Image: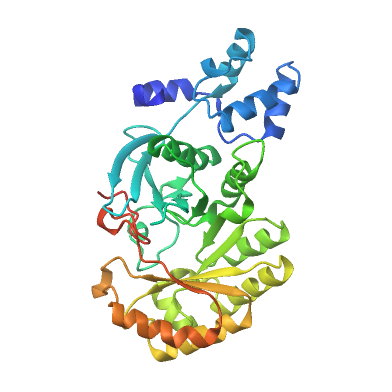
């Protein structure tokens, strides 16, 4: 296992090689052919990686030593390592991972079981740090240290499920980072997650969340990606949104809402708006009216999330404030869910991921 190797040994192991995790069947088939092997070998490797979840070449019993030696020369077989593992009183578990032990480049995933034991969600990261600066988000306070590769994204799921001893029913790309700023690795990971010959999860159980990267949303629509799309909205007014989300400077709210409408019309799927509730910032009666107006424009649902951080003197809304805001949203006539922030005691709730224990 890689976690037993030092940093220098890992770098030596990987020199001039490519990661085998994250490779698609098409890519493996091409590489196997270049090695002079028959294409069915690629399928064996693909199934071994993602269906059987092998973690070393020695586990591939259907592959002979000669081919294994060739594969070891071409690929490195990496696994991300767990730097921290915290458990909440509500059953949520947070995992801080490193691609290379001791590198200091940490990213987090969260296992979120529902109270009734039915829905089991893994919230996964797409970047180390983030390219954006949403004022309510702890990840934004970290330095951006790069995109995660598709294999590192998929490995979060494999590692979490192995440790908790269970399988997720849903995957959300809502951890550290802006998924649309790592589009190709995120979609490659989602493809491996969805493929019946790999991890085999239904597309409707996979959600990609964006802070509003409009060109990424339009690419998502053009490619007819089958996954759910969520937009971190957080304010119904362009000026108010600009105060808390710097992405508004590049992609203005009207343009974002046009892209959201296009998503619902072209792909004929409901979009999710995520709305972090911040008293005194975006919870007034007027804010609610504007949000209702937005919701009536298109097929959507709204996930409201109580603020979990305490930056800029902001505070979490009271239950009474939340109830009042929800009453103001009722005229929208769309599904509204209060995501009650499980895992808050371990800094695992929405907006809190910052590799902090």
Estimate the x, y position of residue 347 in percent, counting from the top left.
Answer: 29, 55
| Residue 273 vs residue 281, the one in the foreground | 273
Give left or right: position of 86 versus 260: left
Residue placed furthest toward the front: 116
Give left or right: position of 156 versus 38: left
**Compared with residue 81, is residue 127 higher up or lower down, i.e. above or below?**
below
Estimate the x, y position of residue 166 in percent, counting from the top left.
Answer: 44, 40
Identify the residue shown where x is 63% and y is 75%.
299
Estimate the x, y position of residue 191 in percent, counting from the top left.
Answer: 63, 45
Identify the residue shown where x is 36% and y is 66%.
340
Identify the residue shown where x is 26% and y is 72%.
312
Identify the image's colour scheme: rainbow, by chain, secondary structure or one colour: rainbow
**Compared with residue 28, is residue 73 higher up or lower down, i.e. above or below?**
above
**Compared with residue 106, is residue 117 higher up or lower down, i.e. above or below?**
below
Give the quadrant of residue 267.
Answer: bottom right
Identify the residue shown where x is 66% and y is 40%.
196
**Compared with residue 191, is residue 231 higher up or lower down, i.e. above or below?**
below
| Residue 67 vs residue 250, the one in the foreground | 67
Estimate the x, y position of residue 333 in percent, counting from the top left.
Answer: 56, 83
- Quadrant where the N terminus is found in the figure: top left
Total marks in image: 0
């Amino acid at each position: 296992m890689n976690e037993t190797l030092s940093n220098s040994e890992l770098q030596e192991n990987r020199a001039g090689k490519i990661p085998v995790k994250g490779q698609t069947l098409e890519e493996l088939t091409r590489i196997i052919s270049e090695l002079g092997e028959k294409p069915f070998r690629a399928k064996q490797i693909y199934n071994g990686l993602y269906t059987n979840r092998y973690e070393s070449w020695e586990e591939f019993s259907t592959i002979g030593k000669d081919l294994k030696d060739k594969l070891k020369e071409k690929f490195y077989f990496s696994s991300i390592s767990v730097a921290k593992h915290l458990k909440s009183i509500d059953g949520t578990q947070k995992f801080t991972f490193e691609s290379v032990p001791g590198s200091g480049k940490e990213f987090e995933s969260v296992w979120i079981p529902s109270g009734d034991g039915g829905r089991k969600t893994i919230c996964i990261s797409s970047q180390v740090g983030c390219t954006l600066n949403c004022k309510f988000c702890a990840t934004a306070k970290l330095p951006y240290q790069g995109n995660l590769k598709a294999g590192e994204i998929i490995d979060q799921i494999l590692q979490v499920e192995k440790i908790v001893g269970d399988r997720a029913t849903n995957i959300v790309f809502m951890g550290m980072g802006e998924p649309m700023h790592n589009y190709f690795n995120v979609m490659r990971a989602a493809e491996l997650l969805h493929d019946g010959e790999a991890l085999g999860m239904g597309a409707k159980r996979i959600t990609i969340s964006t802070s509003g990267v409009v060109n990424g949303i339009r690419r998502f629509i053009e490619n007819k990606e089958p996954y759910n799309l969520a937009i971190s909205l957080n304010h119904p007014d362009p000026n108010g949104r600009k105060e808390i989300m710097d992405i508004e400077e590049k992609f203005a709210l009207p343009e974002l809402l046009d892209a959201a409408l296009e998503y619902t019309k072209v792909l004929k799927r409901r979009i999710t708006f995520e709305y972090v509730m911040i008293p005194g910032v975006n919870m007034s009666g007027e804010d609610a009216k504007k949000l209702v107006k937005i919701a009536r424009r298109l097929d959507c649902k709204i996930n409201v999330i109580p603020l979990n951080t305490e930056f800029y003197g902001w505070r979490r809304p009271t239950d009474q404030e939340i109830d009042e805001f929800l009453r103001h949203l009722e005229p929208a006539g769309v599904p509204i869910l209060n995501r009650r922030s499980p895992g808050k005691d371990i800094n695992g709730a929405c907006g809190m991921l910052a590799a902090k224990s």
